[in-house]
């Protein structure tokens, strides 16, 4: 989940002030309403050291009625806590139905800090994840709202903040040896955090990433995220449904797309000016296509399957990229699966069924032109599935891809990104060119009108489903040459890396 | 789950014929109705070799419209299947919304036969369970009814059946070397099956144990279980709820208790004539109490916690047993927690919260006089919680107890069993004895009227929550001396065994 996020986000003083003036009373009001409706609330603050958890918690509670919440700071286990099952200290701190419990670090400590410090055995890790998920599932099923915030900064920023703290005697105590160690091995620690986010991001207790390089931005996003979660909980309560089930076949309201603050991915930051000259394109294309043909043979010999998914804006260049990718591949070893609306047989099965049917045999390559991600894009936006269905689809899809990877597959997902102007240019070109007219329909123009809604859905999709094992790659697509070469190069890199791993561990 | 079951069940020819005459047309009708309502159905047959899976499947489909189902026999993976992710061969066999898929062995093969044969690595086991649970959860959430039947016979019966098959050349091929090996190591294989049942018995896809020593009984129970599951699915569909959520605060209908066939535990077989003479009682009591005092000290020194739960009929002898158990214990090292109706503070928390608060510190003993099992007994029967709530409580409770055990605790649960006459005798005695009058209330008499409903709930509870790590012990309670000694002896045995394990593995 930490791959695709945009850490450059910030907010002007003026914008900050204006938003907070609206957000603070709104949060106060919602706290009272949740209390009246007997909805217990848990807010978890996790994230990297010096990301500002302490500051943000004190900033958040400023809007809250102090009689309605507790803040718990979760340090290492006391001797007493060690003498109880791991979750005991959290069960005993649960809020009642009229309270809010705010955790500065939490049960996640076990699989982050304790894991990093080697306090827990790696062989126990999966059962800790299972215990944590069971804990949250049980609470959510009982009506508790669980809001999980992950405050994120980068290694350099963390180092700077640690230095600023240690330079002053009065704050030097705030930075421990362990903090500095985690900064030194930031990438290793970050990977543990990333795995944790992937294992525990569930529809009943989703994570929200808080980009915390800029303090004001982080505050506004935290307020906004908490407010949205409480509103959703009140709406569910009003509908009489249990906390983990929201069954309403209503397209996501337009208002949900409007707030830029809630977007997390780096999609908007894609540098669409990137381009490649014709000569370089030709040279690289030839080199990479030959390399892929070689690798394809090697993969066949070693029986490693490859799954490539292509998504992107209409006219984003999926077809062209797939064509270049497969041009020199042995046709007996790959297959392109175009994904249209489900046919009659597909409609009477689980939405993932048709993709499972096309899982490649070991040694083969399956290329999906549009994929299972339709569930969280078109089906979400058009209301073809319920909110509850697309919300739980993120986990379901991650579970499926993880099974592919566990089986040994290389799994990559490409998002072909272009801007709105470029799309219009390509649409018009298609309409004017008799040979390309078949590629453009009225539906394409209609979808274009929902650009903002799609952008919001894509943003959430990229963050929730970009996993270490099956990452999303955003392809800068305005220049077709650049885009195609990036796709090919990414595939070559991933296949080569897989062979290295294969040599290291041939089981 | 296999601890508490009663394998002696059988059925007369006459009773069988009478029941089947009603069940067969009922199943036919329900198949048509599920088809009309677009409910996909999966029926899984698992269980021990020679338990009669093949026969029972052919018996079951006799009532079914052959255009509406497929039977899949799941053998070892073919080369082709090995070259796909493990669940691929099952995804591709899923029924459409108008079909029924019947599996003769299934995805459970991976964690049973393959595990026994050493084909899979033990370190992968937990992730296989996770994959299986995710698979069934995804399908159930999408509306599929998943009926899982486990056909059970004992080692001796299996050996006999294998012999009968191998004696005749025409059927000898049916018994493989591996079958014979699994019979030879029956206990080891049974433990794997038991663990599998515990790990995968979920509210959205529960297991039904089919006692298969008597073929007719097994057929009737399979028909009854399938019919009940289809009826429940149709009811949920009619209520417009998703398959995994049934929210209705209606006490379980009385009709559900009526069918003896669906009861699985050995509760009814409890030998209540067991008794102990006064002399032997005194001698044993003294010996065991001294032994417990010693063990208590040893447990304290080694910091091993103990959790003992007591449930049973009113006047079943819980209090007396607890008193004898604790008489010579150091009072600083144990605590008795009486469990009454939840107080105001407990009511505004999760139902397990108050029990988590009383989890003993390492080295201490916690004794619960009535327990968290109130959720699946009194709360179920009185309608204090929804059907969905008590149905998912079995997993929730198992998850909690497993966490206690993983932390190192000894966990035992006692069911104090008496018969209805004995209860009446004790009630009357309490009413007549001025010193015992406080022990009896009008509510006790009212609960007594619901004896059948309780018996049904207790039966289901014993089967679904008796785990290898935290077993139920049925205590024959008509004779108080016998009951008390059995409780003490069981505690002593479990503590002694724990010390042996402790010495083997002191981490």
Image (cartoon, coloured by chain):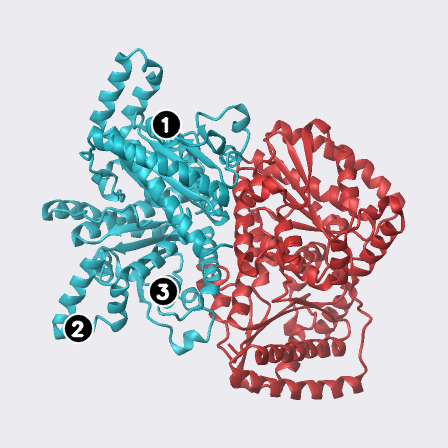
Chain colours: A red, B cyan
Q: What residue is at 80 percent from the left and 76 percent from the top?
A: A275
Visible residue check, residue A248: no
First reached walking from the N terminus: tag 2 or tag 3 = 3
Identify the chain of the residue marked 2, using the numbered disc in the image. B
Q: Chain of mark 3?
A: B
Q: Residues within 10 Å of mark 1 (few under 14, many from 20)?
A: few
**Quadrant of the rendered structure where residue B169 is?**
bottom left
Image x and y of residue A305, in percent: 53, 76
- The answer to whether A282 is drawn above or below residue A147 in the figure is below
Same chain letter for marks 3 and 1: yes
Q: How many marks?
A: 3
Observer-nearest of A165 and B408: B408
Whole-angstrom CA distance, mark 3 to mark 1, is: 47 Å
Where is residue B285 drawn, in percent x and y?
30, 33
- Decide: is B320 above or below B298: above
Q: Earlier in the sequence, mark 1 or mark 2?
A: 2
| Chain of residue at mark 1 | B
For mark 3, what is the residue?
B109
- Seen as rendered, the residue at the extreme left is B14
Q: Cα distance, mark 1 to mark 2?
A: 58 Å
Q: Could you say which quadrant of the image residue A29 lies in?
A: top right
Q: For mark 2, what is the residue?
A: B172
């Amino acid at each position: 989940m930490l791959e695709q996020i945009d850490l450059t986000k910030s907010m002007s003083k003026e914008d900050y002030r204006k938003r907070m003036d609206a957000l603070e009373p709104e949060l106060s009001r919602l706290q009272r309403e949740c209390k009246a409706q007997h909805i217990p609330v848990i807010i978890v603050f996790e994230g990297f050291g010096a990301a500002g958890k302490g500051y943000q918690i004190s900033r958040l509670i400023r809007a809250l009625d102090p009689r309605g919440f507790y803040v718990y700071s979760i340090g290492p286990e006391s001797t007493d806590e060690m003498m109880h099952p791991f979750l005991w200290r959290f069960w005993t701190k649960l809020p009642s139905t009229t309270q809010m419990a705010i955790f500065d670090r939490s049960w996640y400590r076990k699989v982050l800090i304790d894991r990093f410090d080697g306090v827990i055995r790696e062989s126990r890790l999966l059962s800790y994840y299972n215990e944590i998920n069971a804990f949250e599932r049980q609470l959510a099923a009982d009506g508790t709202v669980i809001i999980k915030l992950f405050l994120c900064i980068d290694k350099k920023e963390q180092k700077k903040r640690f230095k600023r703290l240690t330079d002053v005697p009065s704050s030097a105590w705030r930075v421990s040896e362990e903090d500095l160690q985690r900064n030194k091995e930031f990438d290793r620690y970050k990977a543990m955090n990333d795995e944790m986010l992937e294992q525990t991001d569930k529809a009943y207790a989703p994570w929200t990433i808080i980009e915390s390089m800029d303090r004001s931005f982080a505050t506004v996003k935290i307020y906004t995220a908490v407010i949205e979660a409480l509103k959703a909980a009140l709406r569910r309560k009003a509908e009489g449904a249990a906390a983990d089930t929201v069954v309403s076949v209503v397209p996501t309201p337009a208002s949900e797309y409007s707030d830029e603050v809630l977007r997390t991915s780096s999609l908007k930051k894609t540098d669409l000016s990137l381009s490649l000259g014709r000569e370089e394109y030709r040279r690289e294309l030839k080199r990479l296509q030959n390399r892929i043909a070689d690798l394809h043979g090697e993969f066949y010999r070693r029986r490693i399957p490859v799954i490539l998914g292509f998504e992107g804006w209409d006219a984003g260049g999926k077809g062209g990229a797939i064509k270049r990718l497969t041009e020199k591949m042995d046709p007996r070893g790959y297959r392109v699966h175009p994904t249209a609306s489900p046919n009659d047989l597909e409609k009477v099965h689980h939405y993932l069924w048709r993709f499972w049917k096309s899982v490649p045999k070991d040694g083969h390559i399956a290329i999906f032109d549009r994929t299972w991600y339709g569930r969280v894009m078109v089906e979400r936006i058009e209301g073809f599935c319920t909110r509850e269905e697309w919300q739980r689809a993120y986990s379901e899809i991650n579970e499926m891809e993880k099974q592919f990877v566990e089986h040994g597959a290389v799994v990559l997902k490409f998002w072909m990104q272009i801007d709105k102007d470029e799309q219009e240019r390509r649409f018009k070109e298609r309409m004017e060119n008799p040979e390309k007219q078949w590629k453009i329909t009225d539906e394409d123009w209609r979808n274009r009108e929902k650009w903002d809604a799609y952008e919001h859905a894509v943003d959430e999709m990229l963050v929730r489903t970009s996993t270490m094992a099956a990452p999303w790659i955003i392809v800068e697509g305005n220049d077709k040459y650049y885009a195609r070469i990036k796709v090919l190069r990414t595939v070559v890199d991933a296949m080569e890396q897989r062979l290295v791993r294969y040599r290291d561990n041939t089981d």
